[in-house]
Image: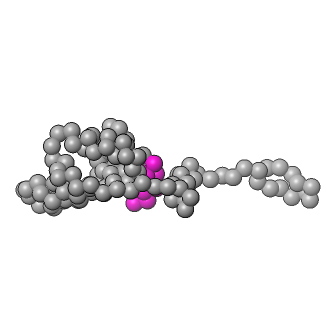
């Protein structure tokens, strides 16, 4: 705090949480966000999620909509490279690996995720 000429105190620094400042910067009207969709045919094979994440980085996308993930149940998984996948598929335990949708979020986009 710093005394002013009128004798009252004022704050000299803004106390804004890093999450709020990131949220404001990514969702600001002046910020360009790249969003894409991709029918990936399946994520039910080894290494496919990593390949999709590499393509996402190559195209500089922050949010990628995924169709035909072919994962069962609903949930989320984080890749070692930092991307987050939110997905939903058949809810039955013994379901065939067909259908399913999801989102892949970059590290920056994850900071804006509320719930």
Compared across the picture, whether 46 is left or right of 38 comes to: left
Measured as percent of width and height from the top left, residue 98 is found at 12, 57
Is residue 112 in the magenta section? yes
Residue 89 placement: quadrant: bottom left
Q: Main secondary structure of the magenta part?
A: loop
Q: Residue at x 83, y 56 (%)?
A: 9
Which span is picked out in magenta? 108-115
66 sits to left or right of 83: left
Residue 29 on image: x %, y %? 55, 62
The question of residue 103 being in magenta is answered with: no
Q: Left or right: 19 with respect to 10?
A: left
Residue drawn 72% across the image and 50% down it: 13
Q: Is residue 74 visible?
A: no
Q: Nearer the viewer, residue 54 or 3?
A: 54
**Depth check: 75 or 60 in front?**
60
Q: Please state if 26 lies on the left or on the right of 74 as rendered.
A: right
What scheme was used to colour the molecule?
one colour
Image quadrant occupied by the C terminus: bottom left
Q: Looking at the image, how many numbered discs can be counted on the residues?
A: 0
């Amino acid at each position: 705090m710093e005394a002013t000429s009128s004798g009252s105190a004022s704050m000299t620094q803004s106390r804004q949480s890093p999450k709020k400042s990131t949220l404001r910067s990514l969702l600001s009207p002046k910020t360009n966000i790249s969003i894409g969709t991709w029918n990936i045919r399946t994520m039910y094979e080894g290494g496919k999620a990593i390949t999709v994440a590499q393509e996402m980085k190559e195209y500089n996308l922050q949010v990628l909509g995924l169709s035909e993930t072919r994962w069962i149940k609903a949930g989320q998984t984080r890749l070692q490279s930092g991307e987050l996948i939110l997905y939903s598929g058949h809810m039955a335990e013994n379901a065939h690996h067909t259908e399913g949708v999801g989102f892949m979020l970059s590290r920056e986009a994850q900071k804006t995720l509320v719930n």
